[in-house]
Amino acid sequence: MSDKRNILVLGSGGREHALAWKIAQSPLLGTLYCAPGNGGMAALAENVALDMADHEAVISFCRAKAIDLVVIGPEAPLVAGLADDLNGANIAAFGPGKIAAQLEGSKGYTKDLCSEADIPTAAYGRFDNACDALAYLDTQSAPIVVKADGLAAGKGVIIAEDMQTARDAVEDIFDGVFGEAGAELVVEEFMTGEEASFFVLCDGENALPMATAQDHKRVGDSDTGPNTGGMGAYSPASIMTPALIDETMKTIIKPTLAAMARRGAPYRGVLYAGLMLTPEGPKLVEYNARFGDPECQVLMLRLKSDIVPALEAAATGSVANMTLDWHDDAAMTVVMAAQGYPGSYDKGTVINGLDKVDAETMVFHAGTARAEDGTITATGGRVLNVTARGKTVAQAQASAYAGVNAIDWPQGFCRHDIGYREIAREQR
Ligand code: AMP
Ligand code: GLY
C-alpha cells in the first residue's frame, strides 16, 4: 500500500457525510470518493453514481481508481455480502461479511447466539409460522414485543400493549407487511429501563470500545409520534458509566465476538449495541452492523484521533494495541427533516442560510443535492444534521439550535428537545 490511501465511502446519509468529513482530515488520505454521496459530501469528495447492490460495478470502480479501502456505511450492502465480495477481489472493506452482518440482518440469529453464549437479553421465541407464534403468545402476557426477523428499515418492531395487538402483529408479519423481512419473527419479553447505544470497533477477535450515545427515535418532542430513523443524538451518554461499559464488554460484546469466531464468521467493523439498562444490568436489545445514524455524527465530532488507521485496523489488521483519543466535550446533533417525515414529504425545496451557521457547528447533510451553482435542495426525509460540541450537552444543544435557527428552510422541521434526558441529569 502506498503512503496515501484512496478511499471510497458508500452511502448517502448524515452518517456517511460525517465519516467522509473525518476521513478527509486524515494525512493518510489520497483521493476520497463517495457513492452515491449527497450535497454535503460533494463539497469534500468526488461523488460517483454507483449502485451498491451491483457488487461487480463497485469492484470495477475500485480497480479503476486504485481504491485501498471501502467504507460501507449502511446495513443493506453488508447483509448482501458486499464486504466478502470486495475482500474476494483483494479490496479492503470496513464492515462485516455477510454471515457476521446477520447480527443485524436476522433478529432470530442474534437471539439464538445470545442464548448459546449466555448473553443477557430479553427472553424470546423464534417462529416461522403464525400457528406456533400464536400458541406461544397464549403462554405470555402484555406488554410484549413482536419483531420481524429481517431488515425492515426500523419499522419491524411492534411493542404490543395488549395481547390482541401482539396477535395482529403476528398475522400482519406472516401476511407479508414487511415482505421478506417477515418470513420469520421473534416474540420477546418487554424490558424496562433507559436505552443507550454503545459502539465498539472490532477486528474479528478484539474489541475496542469507542463511545456511548443516545438517540431520539420518535418524530415529536417528548418522544411522541411515530418512530423515525432518529431525530437527534448526543454523546457521551453518562448513564453508561465506566462500570456499565466494563460489564457490557464482559457480558455482551466479548462473548458475541467469541461466538462469531467459533461460528467461523469473525466480526470485523463497528458493532453497535442497542442496550436496555435494566434493574438487573445491561441487556442487549439489538445489534447493528454499522454506525448509527445520527449517532455517527456526534461520534465523529468527538473523535480526536485520525480515523483512517482505525478503519484499516478493523478491516484488515488488529485493534488490540490501538487507542483512540476523544474530546472530553459532549456533542449533539439535531436532525432537520422535511415536513411530513416519516410519512410523505416534498422533495426539491431550497435550503438557504447554511453559510450563516457558526463555523464551529458542523452541518452534516443527509438527503440533499448540490447544484452546479452551489444551491442545496432537499431530496430526502432526513435532510440535515446540525451538530455541535460543548462542555456540557446543554451547551452543545444551545450551539446546535443556534445553527438550526440560522438555516432558512421553511419546509423543514426538527425536534426542540434533543438531549433532554442528559440535560436533566446535568441540572441535578
Ligand atoms: P430494535 O429495532 O430491535 O432496536 O427495536 C426498536 C426499539 O423498540 C428499541 O430501540 C426499543 O425502544 C424498543 N424495543 C425493542 N425490543 C424491546 C424489548 N424487548 N423491550 C422493550 N423495548 C424494546
Ligand atoms: N439511529 C438508529 C440507527 O441508526 O439504527
Image (spheres, helix red, strand yellow):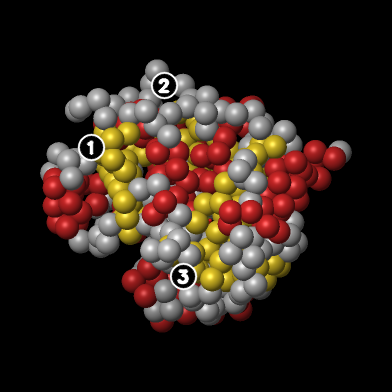
CB within 8 Å, label 3 to label 1: no
The reply to whether residue 274 is visible in this rendering is: no
* Dot 1 or dot 2, earlier in sequence: 1
Could you tell me which residue is drawn at 47 percent across and 35 percent down?
200
* Dot 3 or dot 1, earlier in sequence: 1
Q: CA distance from mark 2 to mark 3?
A: 39 Å
Name the residue beneath numbered marker 1.
Answer: 68
Name the residue beneath numbered marker 3.
Answer: 379
Please name which of the two marks, 2 or 3, marks the residue nearer to the observer.
3
Look at the numbered disc 3 and give the secondary structure of its residue: loop
Residue nearest the observer in this picture, 330 or 246: 330
| Left or right, residue 118 beside residue 281 | left
Above or below residue 341? Residue 244 is above
Name the residue beneath numbered marker 2.
Answer: 322
Crowd rating for badge 3 (residues with CA inside 10 Å; few <14, some 14–19, many 20+):
many
Amino acid type, mark 3:
Thr
Residue 363 location, x and y as percent? 56, 51
Crowd rating for badge 1 (residues with CA inside 10 Å; few <14, some 14–19, many 20+):
many
Amino acid type, mark 2:
Met
Residue 160 location, x and y as percent? 62, 70
The reply to whether residue 244 is visible in this rendering is: yes
